[in-house]
Amino acid sequence: MKIAIAQINPTIGDLPGNARQILEAAQKAVSEGARLLLTPELSLCGYPPRDLLLNPSFLQVMSIALQQLARDLPPELAVLVGTVEENLTAHTNGEKALFNSIALLEKGRVQQVFHKRLLPTYDVFDEHRYFEAGSEANYLTLDNVPIGVTICEDLWNDEDFWGKRSYITNPIADLAILGVDFIVNLSASPYSFGKQKFREAMLKHSAVRFRQPIIYANQVGGNDDLIFDGRSFALNRQGEIVCRAYGFEQDLVVVEFDEVQRDLQLGSISPEYESDDE
């Protein structure tokens, strides 16, 4: 199975433009033989959408755009799209009205929806203002291959790496118990000095600890005070980098999952920068 990462540059609020970027990436992914396409966190509306999420008409148009995108995508390709879903039990349970979600689009319709479980509210993040945390481990089965699905912060709570837990749950551990073949992560992770080395070290630790290949998709671009550097990558069960996209530019990379070895195969690896300053 070939998995493509669409490292795109969404514009916050530009639903038609973002959908067009995803569609173009999907068409290229199909031409390269991919079965599954990953896009960044909240790729349909852009990240961070902030108080646009308080506008009911914006949410309604986003839902319509998601349905239209599902119809427009190549039917032979499964696509994971970052979106927002209404929390139908919010008023009765005293919860937040929305979920930070991933929609699985395939064969012209929304097949499944997954909710982000860990919501960061520190530094530049304020997700508790808008979202309710998902309560279930997320996975899909594609061509008899079980695939764990996570969103950004869901990978940032391995107590064995950090020496502590910031949240009660560890979504990677939950997915490993379920026996998925690999984990995908849709991210909007802002750039900071030395961030990529830290990401790769953290996910290498998790890949080795849980014997789980991990595919990490990140966006690029500048939104208000945030810069997103991309540099999406994938690691095999041994924690080795098998694929890496370019930094600070849009890219589409493909990595292959070997169903016999149950591991990711070596793909294209963009060179690291010679120094952190560069």
Image: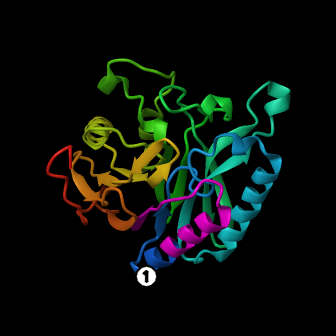
Nearer to me, 124 or 262: 124
Would you place residue 275 above or below residue 257 in this image? Answer: above
Residue 93 seen in the current view:
yes
**Left or right: 115 in relation to 25:** right
> Which residue does the image show at 22% across and 46% down from the upper left?
238
Q: Amino acid at mark 1?
A: Ser
User: Which residue lies most toward the bottom here?
Assistant: 31
Q: Is residue 13 magenta?
A: yes
Q: Which residue range is magenta in the image?
A: 1-25
User: Which residue lies most toward the front here?
Assistant: 224
Disc 1 crowd rating (10 Å Cα; few below 14, some 14-19, many 20+) is few
**Left or right: 146 in relation to 208:** right
> Which residue does the image show at 43% across and 82% down from the upper left?
31
Corner quadrant of residue 134: top right
**Left or right: 231 in relation to 197:** right
Nearer to me, 216 or 227: 227
> Which residue does the image show at 66% across and 67% down from the upper left?
16
Residue at numbered disc 1: 31
Q: Which x, y percent locates residue 9? A: 48, 60
Nearer to me, 116 or 40: 40
